Image: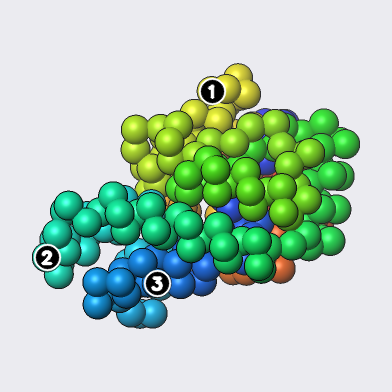
Amino acid sequence: MGKTIKAVLFDMDGVLIDAKDWHYEALNKALGLFGMEISRYDHLSTFDGLPTKVKLEMLSKRYYLPQELHSFINEMKQEFTIDIIHEKCHPLFHHEYALSKLHKDGYKIAVCSNSVRKTIELMMQKAGLMPYLDLIVSNEDVKRAKPDPEMYLTAMEKFGLDPKECVIVEDNPNGIQAAKASGGNVLEVATVLDVNFTNIYNKIKECER
């Protein structure tokens, strides 16, 4: 028989927030100031789910983007992202229902995202999910972002739980790699529509069998 599940750890972009394109658009808008952009193919095949700093390092290696521009581009990307959040981020009923039900049923809930804390908090507030969260782990809270498992291991440690007592909801290859490496039970989803109470509850019961 499996361990009793006591926590659900969520990625944010593509899981709780349909924001994959927002980060892509915001970074390209910042890069566009210098005549650069990331193609849709490269975004989906390589860059999706990685922190902006890592993306910029990769662009410097591949396309000789000057290192001294990283800080400014990152700053502009964050500003453009915040503008998009205010314009497009809104509550989704099935997410509010799922997290409120999990919270009411006594499960610990965390969001573990490669985004900066300011962005995570703003998105969670705009999506109406902040009241149900016990913990946020951002890329500023760890030394190694996803695909390293440190982010999920940090959340488990703070909750005082074994990996097998946690379900992790992830959508992209870098996040799924991190989730599996942490030893947690992984629920892979394709879109934000797959993140609903029924799917999460079924995964919890599957893990406890």
> Which residue does the numbered mark 1 point to in the structure image?
157
Q: Left or right of 110: which side holds 54?
A: left
Q: Alpha-carbon distance for marks 2 and 1? A: 39 Å
Considering only vertical position in the picture, is 131 above or below 39?
above
Q: Earlier in the sequence, mark 3 or mark 1?
A: 3
Residue placed under numbered mark 3 in the picture: 29
82 or 37, which lies in front?
A: 82
Q: Is residue 157 above or below residue 16?
A: above
Visible residue check, residue 132? yes
Q: Quadrant of the N terminus?
A: top right
Amino acid tagged 3: Lys
Q: Residue at 53% across / 40% down in the picture?
A: 117
Q: Is residue 5 visible?
A: no
**Percent position (x, y) of residue 174?**
40, 55
| Badge nearest the viewer, 3 or 1 | 3
Q: Position of residue 105 (x, y in %)?
A: 86, 36
Disc with the residue nearer the chain's start (2 vs 1): 2
Front: mark 3 or 2: 3
Three-letter amino acid code of the residue under disc 1: Glu
Which residue does the numbered mark 2 point to in the structure image?
64
Camera-side mark, 2 or 1: 2
Distance from the alpha carbon under mark 3 to that under mark 1:
38 Å
Mark 2 residue element: loop
Residue 159 appears left or right of 139 = right
User: Dot 3 surroundings within 10 Å: few (below 14), some, or many (20 or more)?
Assistant: some
The percent position of residue 59, horizontal first and vertical second, equals 21, 64
Q: Quadrant of residue 36?
A: bottom left
Q: Amino acid at mark 2?
A: Tyr
